[in-house]
Amino acid sequence: MTKILVLYYSSYGHIEQMAESVAEGVREGGAEAMVKRVPEIVPIDVATAHGFKLDQAAPVAVPDELADYDGIVFGIPTRFGGMAAQMRNFLDQTGGLWHTGKLIGKVASIFTSSATLHGGQEATILTSIPTLLHHGMIFVGLPYSNADLMQLDEVSGGTPYGASTLSGTDNKRKPSARELGLARAQGKFVADVARRQSAA
């Protein structure tokens, strides 16, 4: 069976919740889904003082295990329009995988979050893609065949580059039903593409 890793970093639980929806979509697409997270690198006292959600159920991944999957969906929150340092730190440890070409031909996708509507969601995904291309991965987004990408009746994340959510500047807004639906659709699409790729 095609195996997909949903690998994320989440400070406040928004990307964590989106990751679970992506995994649901992967399973709907007929693939096996594993949800893992990257290690927290902020000192515990600082993370606690800022209200980080430290009790997340997903196990912590190690870089070498990325080679064990047919595809990887990365949950990367926005930090000033770019990749969060926790994910950057993790990916910077994948030099051995690059050197041996272990990720070449594997499907990759990204979902994200930001505090505000124009807070850099698309910039985060677009500037994260080069890392995946250096590994020889095949990037897929979220096609406009999903009509929820075109709705204007509510404030919502969602881009053709990948699903997204908004947290609000106080981090109190949770992913909406539409945003979670886009995450599921992305997971299913990744599973479909990865299954076809692994059968080729």
Image (cartoon, rainbow, N blue to C red):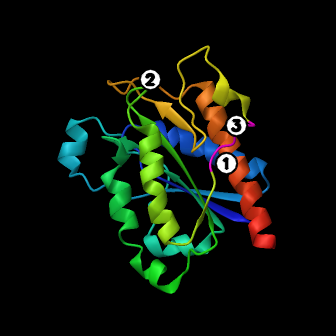
Give the labeled residue for mark 3: 144
- x, y percent for residue 20: 59, 44
The spot of residue 22 in percent (x, y) is: 62, 45
Range drawn in magenta: 141-145
Give the residue displayed 31% in from the left and 39% down from the top: 52
**Is residue 142 covered in magenta?**
yes
Give the alpha-carbon distance from disc 2 to disc 1, as whole Å: 22 Å
Give amino acid for label 3. Answer: Tyr
Judging by the rendered image, the residue that carries numbered circle 2 is: 173
Residue projecting furthest to the bottom? 100
Mark seen at residue 187: 1
Quadrant in the rendering for residue 118: top left
In the rendered structure, find residue 94 and report the number of the disc placed on it: none
Q: Closer to the camera: disc 1 or disc 3?
A: 3
Report helix, strand or loop for mark 3. loop
CA neighbours of label 1 inside 10 A, class few (<14), some (14 to 19), many (20+): many
Give the answer, above or below, for where 72 lies relative to 183: below
Which residue is most to the top? 153
Q: Residue at x 47, y 76 (%)?
A: 64
Q: Position of residue 81 (x, y in %)?
A: 35, 42
Above or below, 143 relative to 200: above
**Mark 3: few, some, or many residues within 10 Å (few <14, many ≥20)?**
few
The answer to whether residue 78 is seen in the rendering is yes
Q: Could one spot residue 39 in this view of the protein?
A: no
Instruction: Name the secondary structure under disc 1.
Output: helix
Please give the count of numbered marks on the rendered protein: 3
